[in-house]
Image: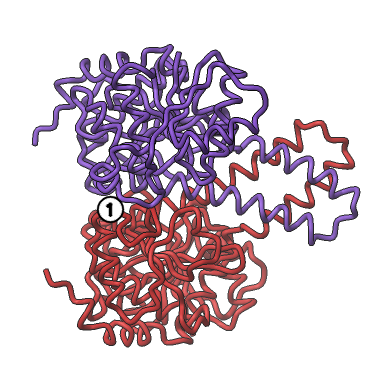
Chain colours: A purple, B red
Amino acid sequence: MKIAVDAMGGDQAPETIVQGSVEAVRELNVSVILVGDERALHKELAKTGPAESQITVKHCTEAALMDESPIEVLRHKKDASVRVAFNLVKSGEADAAVSAGNSGATLAVATVVLGRMNGVERPGVASILPSVRGQLIIIDVGVNVDCKPSFLLQFGVMAHAYAQAILKIEEPRLALLSIGEEDSKGNLLVRQTHDLFKKSSLNFIGNIEGRDLYSDQADIVVCDGFVGNVVLKLSEGLTEIIAGMLEDELKHGPWPPVDVMILRKLLNRFHKKVDYAEFGGAPLLGVRGIGIISHGRSSPKAIKNAIRTAAEFVRQKMPDRLQAGLDESKELIISPN
Amino acid sequence: MKIAVDAMGGDQAPETIVQGSVEAVRELNVSVILVGDERALHKELAKTGPAESQITVKHCTEAALMDESPIEVLRHKKDASVRVAFNLVKSGEADAAVSAGNSGATLAVATVVLGRMNGVERPGVASILPSVRGQLIIIDVGVNVDCKPSFLLQFGVMAHAYAQAILKIEEPRLALLSIGEEDSKGNLLVRQTHDLFKKSSLNFIGNIEGRDLYSDQADIVVCDGFVGNVVLKLSEGLTEIIAGMLEDELKHGPWPPVDVMILRKLLNRFHKKVDYAEFGGAPLLGVRGIGIISHGRSSPKAIKNAIRTAAEFVRQKMPDRLQAGLDESKELIISPN
């Protein structure tokens, strides 16, 4: 199995990307094609110890910048590492692509290079988040900022197949993120989408409020990409701030040194539980192939876990499963407009 | 100074509302008119010790239910406690009203009874949240779920006056909640609103992302009520979940009893810092009078603090200040549609 990794995308690319890829081939049963500037990549590879035969390098001359518009990347950077990575998927030289770069550009490139699945108006990005007792899928998390109800329905149908195959949940509970549990609560988009989900054959449990997002009431939460991105980044930021407040308390509170040691153990255990690096990247759902987005600030461990998710998607033949789910809901998901 | 308190609104009304009102008249220089069923209120008052001369009771026969639609309350419950409370403001018998009841109904009643300020298309609800080093205002937090750019501009203009008068910030930094800092990032509403704020005379610092919301980069964050409500409830829920995880760690982790005592002290200090009850209710901005919404789950302390905020609004003559701010921005805030 070969995973193409965009080695030039990410805040600390190519260093952390190369490190994570090397960890992946050492621990997982995969090969990695690192896509990027070959001189830079060989230099980074040399730092990681003896050469790994499962790592190859595919040279390219450009890279998408983190804040570059997706349209610019599509038009003017035909040799961008992210594009070359998805070209490898398209040609069959790789089974999946992973990028920690500009996520808007990644989705745009994947959509243009691989094409959309039947029944999909907009591919979405699904993220897995830790919940009280397990995890949940939230879709969309940042690309589709202005949605129609049919987009949200398609996200839900795809996330259902994802949860079944990867999270191994037979009948995943699907909820719509809203501002009240009653059917009538929400903005126009949510109220219209609510009606669509009710008609679907999915295990739709209704609306869920922000305060219950992480309390294990739903396995899948659907929202537009603007709201999803706010939720994702707010959760990250707030968790860090709370951890920071507790750290401050340790440093400046009235604690004798022996207590500080005990408190630090508690904090370390907490950090581990909410470590986003543990969660393996966000899959693009709805393109004809496999693409995994990793956080721009990905650590080597996060990259390794994104590669693990990509491999799991390949093993589970996720594109076929997603298309089967879409085909089953065909009559409902085709937008009347 | 007289504050009308909707004694029948809130998850634990009238008990906690009466307790909080009694605490308020004992600690603050205010009188309270409790609005609700007089038998129930006198019964609760009897539990709180010697009668307080600054507390009077205004009888009424109805109450808005927590999940009742605002339109139903407006049409069919003319004698609802929340409506009677705002009638007292309208007639001048009270200087402000406080309610922990159905917030949609409260805003609708306040708008109908008091009317809108000049230049306001939709009154908004502003909430104060704790940030790393201080606090921030977020507006709107839950009533205006489908907004036009002009609504968000009006929210910003009013929050500016609020931050100056109540938070004592001379030039409050105002930001738009979005999914990237660049001007071009966001959904259609945010991108159009961005242009309006840029033309305004406010201290507009641009977009802010979810992850930076609490990191003290902005004093005022503007968003539509759907997003604001999700942010508010998610923040509350996540904070509780993290506190719960730490509690779990205490109970089930490998800690000797003496360590548990130390860790519990840390947790208690943390709880105190993020205690929403410390923050004094959410003012309605844009109605011709003063109304403060308190959380449905308000404790007596939260009710007392909402009454304190109401009193501060009266002292600062907030309606005049808000109208002055709106008048100054008149040319910009009148929607072209």
Q: Quadrant of residue A130?
A: top right
The residue lying at 39 percent from left, 62 percent from top is: B207
The residue lying at 54 percent from left, 13 percent from top is: A29
Q: Amino acid at mark 1?
A: Asn
The residue lying at 59 percent from left, 69 percent from top is: B134
The extreme front residue here reads A39
- Is residue B58 found left or right of B49 in the rendered image? left
Q: Nearer the viewer, residue A317 or B242?
A: A317
Visible residue check, residue B128: yes
The residue lying at 91 percent from left, 48 percent from top is: A258
Q: Chain of mark 1?
A: B
Q: Quadrant of the C terminus of chain B?
A: bottom left
Residue A245 position, x and y percent, is 68, 56
- Is residue A240 found left or right of B179 in the rendered image? right
Residue B5 position, x and y percent, is 46, 69
- Is residue A56 found left or right of B53 in the rendered image? left
Q: Quadrant of residue B6?
A: bottom left
Residue hosting label 1: B187
Residue B193 position, x and y percent, is 27, 65
Residue A335 position, x and y percent, is 13, 32
Quick one: label 1, few (<14), some, or many (20+) residues within 10 Å? Answer: many
